[in-house]
Amino acid sequence: MNNFILIKDNILNKNECESIIDYFKNKTNSKTMNGINYALFLEEDYINFIFLKDRVTLLFDEYLKAYPQLNFVKDKWLLNEFRFKHFKPNNYFKNWHSEHSIEGNKRLLCLQFYLSDHNCGTEFYDGYTVLSKTGRAMMFPAYFTHTHRGQLCPEYKDRYILGGYANFSDDIIGT
């Protein structure tokens, strides 16, 4: 772990990653923006990938154990925004950004599952880089402190990521 970034290898096996890619690659609810295909991960999709709930729970538990200062808000957020991302060759998220924004103003943590291997990954503004590796998961704060961008795949391969956000929930804030 480095700077509130949790990296967990082999959280998903190769077959699980391939099954997620195959399922979402041609999903009808996908949209394309700047050469990147997105498909929302809907509640009914969990039926096909029930193992993801356990893996997400494991990651959140490990993150809270590593960073106990988050325990004061652990009952106030949910992972309720998950999406499949397909980056076609020569496309990547080029702009520096953070996940907490005007549109995503309730985002607390970012979670990414890398579903494919590449000689590139996620580059943080401080120079720290996490390479994409099949089955690797990464969790980090959604705020400006973790400004990041994607990197161009030098091998010009398709790249696949399953990403999600732990959001503060209106339903449980103030309870």
Image (tube, helix red, strand yellow):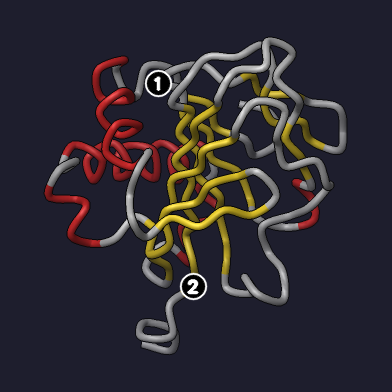
Front in this rendered view, residue 25 or 94: 25
Please tell me the numbered disc located at residue 90. Answer: none
- Residue at 43 percent of width and 45 percent of height: 84
Front tag of 2 and 1: 1
**143 on left or right of 160:** right
Q: What label does residue 168 carry, if any?
A: 2
Task: Classify mark 2: helix, strand or loop.
Answer: strand
In-front residue for pair 15/58 = 15
Question: In x, y percent, where is residue 155?
Answer: 68, 10
Q: Position of residue 17 (x, y in %)?
A: 33, 25
Question: Within the image, what quadrant is residue 56 found in?
Answer: top left
* Element carrying mark 1: loop
Report the Cα–Cα distance between label 2 and label 1.
27 Å
Q: Identify the residue shown where x is 25% and y is 25%.
A: 16
Q: Residues within 10 Å of mark 2 (few under 14, many from 20)?
A: many
Residue 15 x, y percent position in the rendering: 24, 17
Any mark on residue 135, and which? 1
Residue at x-position 49% and y-position 67%: 167
**Outermost residue to the right:** 126
Give how far across and how far down residue 125 sits, in percent.
Answer: 86, 38
Corner quadrant of residue 74: bottom left
Which residue is more in the foreground, 139 or 33? Answer: 33
Query: Which residue ends up furthest to the left in the rendered image?
Result: 47
Residue in the picture at 42% in, 68% down: 77
Residue 25 higher or lower than 135, as above or below: below
Q: Amino acid at mark 1?
A: Gly
